[in-house]
Image (cartoon, grey):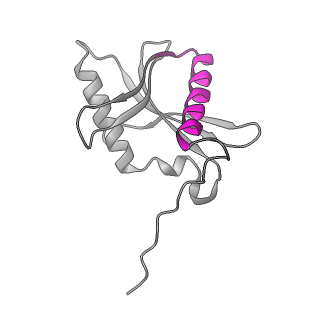
Amino acid sequence: MGIPLKKPAAAAAPAGRSTRAVGDAAEQQALAHLQAAGLRLLQRNYRTPGRGGGEIDLVMRGPDGTLVFVEVRLRRSSLHGGAAASVGQVKQRRIVLAARHYLMRLGRPPPCRFDVVLVDAGEPPRIDWLQAAFDASA
């Protein structure tokens, strides 16, 4: 019988800054990047009601009218696969659940996609925008 492997922990927040503050700063950087590319913010931190639901960091509208559900991921190290590796199937399912809930409020849903914005810490931070990173079949 082997020793169970522990899931790698995220790197600690820089001294004097809470994990929440660091995450909010990464989300703000991602938002500025997307707005500079022509997307318009519709809602931040959309959450489904109740326990076990999902959350969408940014709900945006593309210049062509596409509704874009954005997951922002921050990593301070590329060990363990970097930010992209942290958006697994369980996280994708929760985002899709929240997106479906969001779409129920609309009379006629527009075309949609799921993007991931990766913010890898460094000086300067590196931002990678993965458009259509996954689909609703997740």
Q: Is residue 31 magenta?
A: yes
> Among all residues in the image, which is located at the extreme right?
123
Q: Position of residue 77 (x, y in %)?
A: 65, 53
Q: Is residue 132 magenta?
A: no
Q: Main secondary structure of the magenta part?
A: helix
Q: Position of residue 119 (x, y in %)?
A: 61, 39
Which residue lies at the image location 59% right of the left edge and 51% below the top edge?
Answer: 82
Work out whether residue 56 or residue 106 is closer to the camera in this orientation and state it. Answer: 56
Which residue lies at the image location 27% right of the left edge and 22% below the top edge?
Answer: 103
User: Can you tell which quarter of the image residue 107 is in?
Assistant: top left
- Asked if residue 52 lies left or right of residue 13, the reply is left
Which residue lies at the image location 28% right of the left edge and 36% below the top edge?
Answer: 97
Which residue lies at the image location 55% right of the left edge and 43% below the top edge?
Answer: 19
Q: Quadrant of the C terminus?
A: top left
Rendered position, 97 above or below 85: above
Label tally: 0
- Asked if residue 23 lies left or right of residue 55, the reply is right
Rendered position, 53 above or below 42: below
Q: Is residue 108 visible?
A: yes
- Asked if residue 90 lies left or right of residue 11, the reply is left
> Among all residues in the image, which is located at the extreme front?
16
Q: Quadrant of the N terminus?
A: bottom left
Residues in magenta?
A: 19-41
Work out whether residue 7 or residue 17 is closer to the camera in this orientation and state it. Answer: 17
Q: Position of residue 67 (x, y in %)?
A: 40, 20
Work out whether residue 129 or residue 48 is closer to the camera in this orientation and state it. Answer: 48
Q: Is residue 138 visible?
A: no
Work out whether residue 78 or residue 53 is closer to the camera in this orientation and state it. Answer: 53
Rendered position, 33 above or below 124: above
Q: Position of residue 72 (x, y in %)?
A: 51, 36
